[in-house]
Image: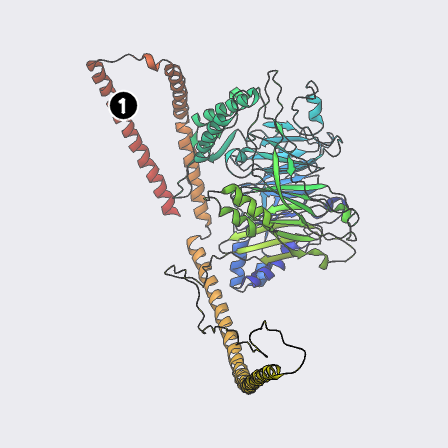
Amino acid sequence: MDLSTFNYSLSKHNIWQQCVYKNDSNTKKLNDLMEVYEDDLYVCDNYKTFNCIRYLNLKSFKGLCVKEDFDTARTSFKKIRIDRKIDYYVNNITINKNGKLLALIGEEGVNVMVIPHTINQINVEELRANIITVGSDIYSSNSGIKIVKAAWHPLSSTNSHIVILSSDGCLRLFDVSSESKEPEQRYYIGPQYYNEYKAFSSSVYIPGRSISGNSEEMETISFAFGNGDDWEIFTIYVLMKNGDVYAICPFLPSKSTVKKSLLENLSLSIEQRWKESDPEDLVIDQQYRLQRCWISTVLQNLKPVKLNELGDEDEEVIINGNISRFKDIHPVIQGPFLLQPAPIEFDPEKSDLDSIASSIISLKTEPFSIILIAYTNGKVDVCLNVAPVEALWMSNNETVQDFELPVLAVYETINLKFKNDLPNIKNNVINIKEDKRYPDICYLYHHYGVHSISFHNWLSLFNDINNNNNLLQKFEDILKREIPSDVSLKVDTLVFGNENDDNPVVGLASSTGIFVGYNLLVLSSSNDFVSIELPIRIKTNSLLFNRNNDNKDYKDLFPVMDLTCPMPVHLGSKKKTGQLYPNFINETTLKYLAEQITLARNDLKELEIYRNKIEKKVNMQSEEYFNQLKKLKDICKRISTSLKSNTENLSARMERIIDNQTMLITKADILLQMLFDRCQPELTDEEKKWFSELKHLSSIITKKHKPHIKQLRQQLDMLKEETKDKIEITEQAIILGTSQKKSVFEALNQESIALMNTMNTLTNLQNEMENLKISNQ
């Protein structure tokens, strides 16, 4: 099945009918009412008030399209309803990393929907889901605090930590699986943060300090999680209304999942930077001591994560973000970032739109991450995070902490070229979303459509200089070339409706499933939906290459004719004479004149000979030219005749090839669908009952062994405490005698045999449980 047919069928699906309600107050916000997780599509039914979540499995939908059952395909979707009523407008939905929790975000509250396990049940049109209210006491209607943005923290080991930025300038981190009313962490970044640090003098580094003194310009707008290595993965960036960017590091949940190699590399880089730092700088020295203490504590309390995929060599571990020693000191809010060189500002004579920051994103690119800042007037600053921030903590001592401001290198400023006469241009907002397949591509959607920005054309040049000796020079050479990013308008929403009225994009997502394909899904406020097939990058080798690595110069097949200058023609005497002649005629002068006349006649004869030769050559070239024209005319006639007939035959042949290719694609889709149906069939009611029984048996076994497990953990904690006390006196260990060693080894052997028997028993029990699950699947 052709992807264009699939995209067209999806655009005509009934799931898009009356799912969005457009009004002026809702279009002024950043809306994101569509989410895709693997092959699952979630759409917020937000018509007038929140109604439900519409769900569509794209794999099943394409399977119906392959079977050409378009009527069933376009009407098949499910509604997920909740028991409680949400009394606010939901302008954003976002799903967590494992696809089990869906956050319903509005200005007046955040609720988390638990996705039902029976969501793929056959012949069911409506499902019921439980919801969890987050921060109900903080974000109530009486508090006056509005929610600016909310997003799931990517490092959460339980996939249940959500970060909420509110209008009071506070960044709160909630764990919805344990405590949803009170935040686990909170940081103030707005004007209220100044009041908490009034005691500091002006020379002290005050967290939250801004170049602008206007409190309205210090309004928080958006945030983004850092991507990359080193401390950047533990960093969060906060954007202000005036475009200032602040950072908090470290910012991570109490239980976070990271790769062990990242922590080990971070430990080595901390030691290296500490050695290279100035030992007389007490503030920096103290910060590196805190960094070293933090990373060493984290490495001592690692817990491995069971790998879900085979062949994953880089082990993931769970770290504890709440370290007891760091409870009394808090991370420094670093900023504002210095943008160097200064970004280009729009000419006020050509554009009278206010430059108000709208959104920020950090892209996980190599060799450094890219940070984008979008403004409501269509300005986009592309910044290179070449000097990532490091972890900094506020100290309780009286040392003056005057740190240098962090820096972002501005690569370019992009102009989306919004016109002043566009409808409702002053209420325009821009949201940025990254592409799920390629990290160097992002999408900006706004009131007038969708723009895509690709950094691949110049970012790939930086990847080529990783192993080069002269890195700085190569880096500067690439920057001097000023290669612009590839900016293109993917969707123009003004063509869908009235030219005098805007049509904001309220949902954007990209799908990368194997069966569904690589597509861009766009939803507008007028319930218009567009699905675009995106190109996949294919690495190809150049057709012009030399297998033998022969670097010899190319030799022309035509011989090169040497050009020589013609012989000079001398008129008169070849040599000047120094003899003086009288002014009267005598025998000598007559003799001289006769000689000169003879030489002149000889020269004229030579000129006549050369003229005849040139004339003959010109005539020959003229005849050859006309002969070549005749030949070319005959060749053109033959080519045109041959091409005409061959073109007709080729067109028919290409049509047959296209038909055969379409038929092969359809067969491949049918075979793929059959393969999915056989390998991943829908479970029957008996199988679901059996799995429920297995789950019940598992809970019984867990409850039975729970006291024993708890006792073992307590013993393990006691042994850890005893070990810590014994480490300090390891140098004073008593040397055991031969008989004592023998008794100790015998006891250890007995304990080892008992442990091996216990492990064998547990292994047999686990194998039996897995065999039961496999046989019933």
Which residue type carries mark 1? Glu
**Res. 436 in view:** no
| Residue at figure coordinates x 54%, y 39% from the top left | 227
**Res. 65 in view:** yes
Quadrant of the rendered image containing residue 692: top left
Counting labels gives: 1
239 or 523, which lies in front? 239
Quadrant of the rendered image containing residue 29: top right
The location of residue 294, given as percent across then percent down, is: 50, 25
Write down the residue under mark 1: 751
The location of residue 94, given as percent across then percent down, is: 60, 42
The location of residue 545, given as percent across then percent down, is: 42, 62
The location of residue 592, given as percent across then percent down, is: 59, 81
Quadrant of the rendered image containing residue 384: top right
- Label 1, secondary structure: give it: helix
**Neighbours of disc 1 within 10 Å: few (<14), some (14-19), many (20+):** few
